[in-house]
Image (tube, rainbow, N blue to C red):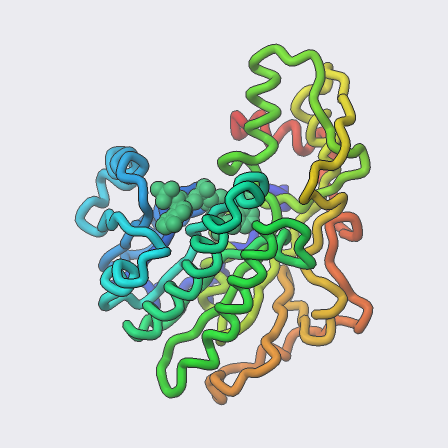
Amino acid sequence: MKTFAADRFAPNDTELSTLRNMIDGASILVTGATGTFGKVFVAKVLSQFNPGRLIVFSRDELKQYEMQNTEPYRSNADRLRFFIGDVRDAGRLEMAMHDVDIVIHAAAIKQVEAAEYNPFECIRTNVLGAQNVVEAALRNGVKRVIALSTDKAVSPINLYGASKLASDKIFVAANNLTGNMPTRFSIVRYGNVMGSRGSVIPVFRRMINEGADSLPITDPRMTRFWITIDQGVNFVLSSLVRMQGGEIFVPRIPSMKVSDLASAMAPHLPQRVIGIRPGEKLHEMMIPEGDARTTVRLGDCYAILPAYSFWRDKDAPPLQAGELMADNFSYTSDNNNEWLDIPTMAAFLQDQAM
Ligand SMILES: NC(=O)c1ccc[n+]([C@@H]2O[C@H](COP(=O)([O-])OP(=O)(O)OC[C@H]3O[C@@H](n4cnc5c(N)ncnc54)[C@H](OP(=O)(O)O)[C@@H]3O)[C@@H](O)[C@H]2O)c1
């Protein structure tokens, strides 16, 4: 079905052929490539395209070693480079980006509580790391950079969200610095990735497996946006084709109540309301009303357009060709026209063994 279809947001035939021209023979660097997003992105690029070089950039050698020794990465060793580095280290990033054409920036500290407890660390990785990625990309003449963002960056109430908002601002404004260079920076923003490391699905799964007699629910009204990792990767690939610099691309994805998710995972277990935790919202927001006037709808997604766009290629089709949203438009997880129901989610989780 469409909601969970692995090919949802996949590039269409025209976009695929543009992507082939862009990626085949090219060098791609992915920061945070050993994470949930990075591994699937790298696998998809290896299976669908023929990049000359794909650089896995992250800190932990064990995660890199394990990735290096599993399929499909093992059998693509000739095209993969395992580069140990920290996005906080500007010199290392600059070295890693030599002759790189495309950068996908996925490295982040993303646990809300860890960011609250370790604010300096969060800012160094998510904000200063973003600045380092921008500067290294500019110095090396990288052609396209996409940075991943989150719904938590919109009207943030925790430091993780605030640091990603700062990162978004850095990447949009980076286009101001490009002069006559071809480098363009854009953002992809989406909601909860089902089953990603540290997310609620693996937490509920562990509790159920350990024989919990109830599942904790912060608030029965709480809603979240949901996307599968395949869909997130597809969307980044399509955005690589659509980007002209400075857009924040937001896929149109379903919402679900967290209590319905718990029912889908454990229909037999009662739910225990524990109250909203500090730094959590009842509902998430992907596009605030304040951005409505610069937001266009492009089929399966929205694009928040940048306030300035003097760097755009004058011959490229204008993104404004999309439908401009009304002044009072906002896109929030409780005000969505696509909802996940319990049986659909239960079937998907069973199918994915989550
Ligand atoms: N998961 C979600 O639900 C979700 C939703 C919306 C947006 N996002 C965004 O999507 C991106 C990817 O998320 P994910 O779920 O794939 O995260 P993840 O599974 O936690 O992976 C994070 C990756 O970043 C690397 N990393 C962390 N700090 C680093 C540093 N200082 N320098 C270099 N690499 C570093 C980690 O490897 P090492 O620890 O070895 O360095 C790992 O490879 C993030 O920007 C996140 O904000 C995620």
Is 12 displayed left or right of 326 in the figure?
Answer: left
Placement of the C terminus among the 4 image quadrants = top right
Q: Is residue 324 above or below residue 115?
A: below
Residue 249, image x and y in percent?
57, 64
Which residue is most to the left? Answer: 78
Residue 196, image x and y in percent?
51, 38
Residue 24 shows up from this direction: no
Q: Considering depth in this image, is 265 or 121 the residue closer to the camera? A: 121
Is 184 displayed left or right of 318 in the figure?
Answer: left
Residue for point 26% across, 48% down:
84
Q: Quadrant of residue 248?
A: bottom right
Residue for point 63% across, 44% down:
226
Q: Quadrant of residue 181?
A: bottom left
Residue 225, image x and y in percent?
67, 46
Residue 167, image x and y in percent?
51, 62
Residue for point 37% across, 64% down:
132
Residue 342 shows up from this direction: yes
Q: Is residue 299 above or below residue 266?
A: below
Q: Is residue 65 above or below residue 289?
A: above
Placement of the N terminus among the 4 image quadrants = top right
Is 228 displayed left or right of 87 in the figure?
Answer: right
Q: Quadrant of residue 149?
A: bottom right
